[in-house]
Image: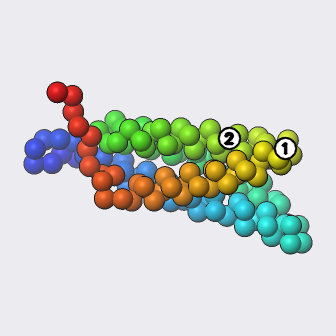
Amino acid sequence: MTTQTGVRRPRISLFCFRAVAALTALFAIGQPIFIGSYFAGTFEALGLHSAGAVFLQGLSLLILAASVAVVVMRGRWWFLTGSVALFLLIHTQATLGYVRALQWHVPIGVVTVAVAVGLAIASFRRGAGSPREGRR
């Protein structure tokens, strides 16, 4: 979409990014809740934790695609860098969980949740929708 000055703005792509980022943050927050329920004795919660990991891996692909769309529409580069970091964290986290490397799975999980929530919050900030500066 263009403004009065003719500069393209990432409106639809930003909306899609925000939706995927919010959903990713919610699922990332759910992961420690599910595993906590498992440790409290609800053994079915381990299946929810595992399913949540699979769903987060899919969401990490969507957030990557949405961030590329934002950057193509002259949005901020941090959408892409944050999404790449989140993608790598989620896939590393899932791999470590499946091989039961809990000494790394838990601390990287904390970082993953923090990055997911931070990326979602940052995408809703006022300056997130402003176009980046062109080359001079």
In the image, which disc is placed on residue 134? none
Query: Horizontal and vertical percent for residue 123?
Result: 41, 54
For discs 1 and 2, the disc positioned in front in the rendered view? 1
Q: Is disc 2 surrounded by few (<14), some (14 to 19) or many (20+) residues within 10 Å? A: some
| Residue drawn at (10%, 48%) of the image | 4
Query: Horizontal and vertical percent for residue 37?
Result: 80, 70
Horizontal side, residue 132 vs residue 125: left or right: left
Spot the residue most to the left: 4
Q: Secondary structure at mark 2?
A: helix
Label 1–label 2 contact, CB within 8 A: no
| Residue drawn at (43%, 51%) of the image | 17
Q: Is disc 1 surrounded by few (<14), some (14 to 19) or many (20+) residues within 10 Å? A: few
Vertical comparison of 87 with 51: above or below:
above
Give the residue type that dot 1 points to.
Ala
Q: Secondary structure at mark 1?
A: loop
Horizontal side, residue 3 vs residue 73: left or right: left
Q: Which residue is mark 1?
A: 101
Vertical comparison of 18 with 44: above or below:
above
Instruction: Report the Cα–Cα distance between label 1 and label 2.
Output: 14 Å
